[in-house]
Image (tube, helix red, strand yellow):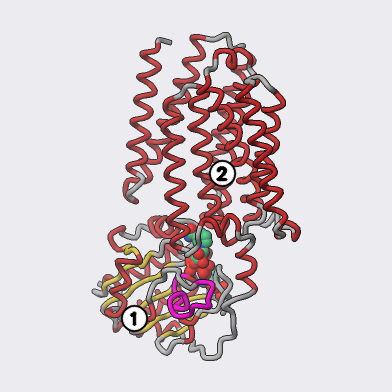
Amino acid sequence: MTDLLKYAIELVAVLLLALGIKGLSKVRSARGANQLAALAMGLAVFGLLLNYLGTSGISIAAWTWIIAGTLVGGVLGVITAQRVPMTSMPETVALFNGCGGMSSLLVALAAALYPAVLEAAGPVAVVSIVVSVFVGAITFTGSIVAMAKLQGWLSTPDWMQSRARHAVNIALAVGSLVGAVEMLRNADSSTGLWLVVVASGLLGIGVTLPIGGADMPVVISLLNSYSGVAAAAAGFVVGSQLLIVAGAMVGAAGLILTQVMCNGMNRSLVSVLFGGALGATAATGGGGGEYTNITSCSVEECALTLEAAERVVIVPGYGLAVAQAQHTLREVTRVLESAGIDVSYAIHPVAGRMPGHMNVLLAEADVPYEQLQEMDQINPEFPATDVVLVLGANDVVNPQAKSDPNSPLYGMPVLDVQDARTVFVVKRGMSAGYSGIKNDLFELANTSMLFGDAKKVLGDLLVELKDLGLGKK
Ligand code: NAP
C-alpha cells in the first residue's frame, strides 16, 4: 500500500473520530457520534492491516490469529455492551480500560521482543515502549482489581490498610524506574523489560486494592485516562497517528472526568488515591444516627398534592436505576404535563453510580433533553417549586452536606430540595445511600416518605393520577 493511501485512511479516521467525540457532547447526537467513532476505529484497524498486507512477510498463520482475534473480540464486545445492566456500567468500563491497558502493553512487549523493530527503533520509539509497558501494565492490573472489587469478588485485606503499603508501592515504583533506565541504556535488555512489566503490574494492584468501594468510580475514570496515555505511547511504537490522537484525547478526557467526579463528591484526588478504604469506613461510621421524626404518606396523598401543583421537579437517583422505573416515570410526567403542570428534572453530577448515569437513564425513556437541568441551574428554582419528587436519590439531596461540618458529606454540592414547598421521597425503607450516613432531609417538616420500590410506587401513582382525571386530554 502506498504511503499516500495509508495517510489518507488515517486522516479520514482521525477526522471521523474527532467528529464523533464532538457529537458525544450532546445527548441528542451521542448515539450517532458513538457509532461514528466506532467506524473511525474500524477504519484505522483496516488501514493498519492493509498496510502490513503490502509490506511485510506476515505468515498465513499470523493472519489467521489476527482475524480470529478481531472476530472474537468484536463479538464479545457487542454481547457485553448489549447485556450489561446500566447499574453495572462502572465494572464494565473498568474491564474495557483493562483491555485497553493490556493491548498497549502487548503491542509494546511485541515491539520490544521483536529484534528487527528494536534495531530500527530510534530513541523516541524506545521511550514510547517503556512508557507503554509501564502505564499499560498499571492500567491492566489496576482495572482488573477495580472491576473485581466492584463485582464483590475481591475485598481489601486488612494488611493493605496499613501504612506499610506506601513503602511497598514506593519500592515497586523504584523497581519500575530501575527497569526503565536499564531499557533506555540497553534497548534489548530483557531483564530491564521484565522488571518494568512485573514491578508496574504489581504497582497497579498495590495502588488500587486499598481504595474503598465509594471511591472506585473515580479510580476507574483515572485508569481510563491512563489507558489513553498507554495507547498514545503505543501509537508512537507502531507509528499510528490515529492511536496517538485517540490516546491523547482519552487521556485528557479521563483526567477532566476524574476532576469533575472529585468535585461532585467533594474529594481530592490525593485523598482518593492514598486515603485507603474510606467508603467502607463511611458506610459504618460518621454522620450516622437513628431517625426519630419521620412522616410517611400514601400514594393517594401524593397524587392529590401533585394535582394541585403548578411546578414539579423530579430528582432521579441510583434507586430509580435499580428499580428500572424510568419508563413508568415518563408515563407519570406525561400525565402531569398534559394537565398543564410544569415538570423538570434536577440532575446532580454524581447521582447514580457513574457520571451521566441519570442522563442516560432518562434518555432511555425519551425524556426531552430540554427538561433536564443541571444542579447549579435548578438550585435557585427550588423555592418557587410546589412539589419535589425524590426518586431513589439520597446522598445528592442530603442537607448535611451544607449544614453539618462534621458530616463526611460536608462540602459536597447537593440539590437544595428542602427549599421547595413539599418534598416526597420515594425509597424502599430507611437504608442509607452510598455514603452510608443519615439524611436530615427525611426528618424535615415539609418532607413525606413514600415507601416502596420506585417502579411500583410510580405505577400506583399513575393509576391514582388517572383516577383523579389527569391525563384525559
Ligand atoms: P444513593 O445515595 O446511593 O441512594 C440511593 C437510594 O436509593 C438508597 O437510599 C436506597 O434506599 C434507594 N433505593 C435503592 N433501590 C431502590 C428501589 N428499587 N426503589 C426505590 N429506592 C431504591 O444515590 P444517589 O443519591 O444517586 O447518590 C449517588 C451516590 O453515589 C453519591 O454518594 C455519590 O458520591 C456516589 N458515587 C457516584 C458516582 C457517579 O459518578 N455518579 C461515582 C462514585 C460514587 P432504600 O434501600 O431504602 O430503598
Could you tell whether 473 is left or right of 418 in the image? left
Tell me the tag on residue 80. Answer: 2
Return the x and y of residue 153 as percentages of the image width and height. 70, 54
The residue pinned by badge 1 equals 420
Q: Give whichever of 265, 303 is nearer the camera.
A: 265
**Which kind of residue does numbered mark 2 sit on?**
Thr
2 or 1: tag closer to the N-terminus: 2
Which of the 4 image quarters holds residue 252?
top left
Chain part drawn in magenta: 396-409
The nearer-to-camera label among 2 and 1 is: 1
Distance of mark 2 from mark 1, alpha carbons? 42 Å
Residue at the (68%, 49%) spot, across then down: 206
Q: Are marks 2 and 1 in contact (CB under 8 Å)?
A: no
SS under mark 1: loop
SS under mark 2: helix
- Say whether residue 402 is magenta: yes
Classed neighbour count for the residue bearing mark 1: other residues with Cα under 10 Å, few (<14), some (14–19), many (≥20)? many
Q: Check the image and report above or below for 88 versus 460.
A: above
